[in-house]
Amino acid sequence: MNNKAFFSVVVFLFAGMMAFAGGDKEEFKVYGNCGMCESRIEKAANDLDGVASADWDKKTKMMEVEYDESKVKIREIHQAIADVGHDTEKVTAEDKTYGNLPGCCQYDRKDSEQ
C-alpha cells in the first residue's frame, strides 16, 4: 500500500474513533431560577466522573449534558442535581435540601413534572 492510501485509511479510522468517542448527549428539564442555580446545577453534573460538559439554560430550564455512559449513567446525573436541591424530570430533590436553597433559588415545585 502506498503512503497516500495508508494515510487515508489512518485518517478514516481516526475520524471514526473520534466520532464514536464523542459520548452520549441528553437534554432534560431541571427546575431553578437564577444564576446561582445555574452554577449549582452545572457544578453538580460536571463534578461527576464521565461528564464532559453540562449547560443549563435558566430561561428554558433545559439541561444539556455530554457524558460517557461507560463511566456515568444518566440517572446518576439526575440524582447529583437533585442532591443539591433541584428537581429534574426524573428525580425529585429532598424537601430539606430544597428548603436550604437561598430564597431566590426556591422555584415553584408544584409545576414540576414528577
Image: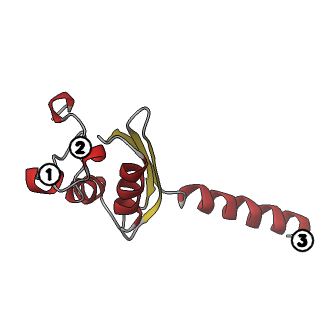
Q: Position of residue 19 (x, y in %)?
A: 60, 55
- Side (left or right) of 56 relative to 101: right
What type is the residue that disc 1 sits on? Gly
Q: Secondary structure at mark 2?
A: loop
- Residue labelled with disc 2: 106
- CA distance separating discs 1 and 2: 7 Å
Q: Quadrant of the C terminus?
A: top left
Return the residue nearer the eye: 85 or 2: 85
Residue type pointed to by label 3: Asn
Q: Are marks 1 and 2 in contact (CB under 8 Å)?
A: yes
**Residue position for label 1:** 99
Could you classify mark 2 by the number of other residues whose Cα lies within 10 Å: few (under 14), some (14-19), or many (20 or more)?
Answer: some
The residue lying at 85 percent from left, 70 percent from top is 1
Query: In the orientation shown, which residue stands out farthest toward the top?
Result: 111
Mark 2: amino acid: Gln
Where on the picture, by quarter, is residue 58? Answer: top left
Query: Which residue is identified by label 3?
Result: 3
Report how far apart the C-alphas of labels 2 and 3 lie in the structure.
62 Å
**Residue at image point 76% right, 63% down:** 11
Dot 3: what SS?
helix
Q: Residue at x 39, y 53 (%)?
A: 36
Earlier-in-chain disc, 1 versus 2 = 1
Q: Earlier in the sequence, mark 2 or mark 3?
A: 3
Question: Horizontal placement of 95 versus 35: left or right?
Answer: left
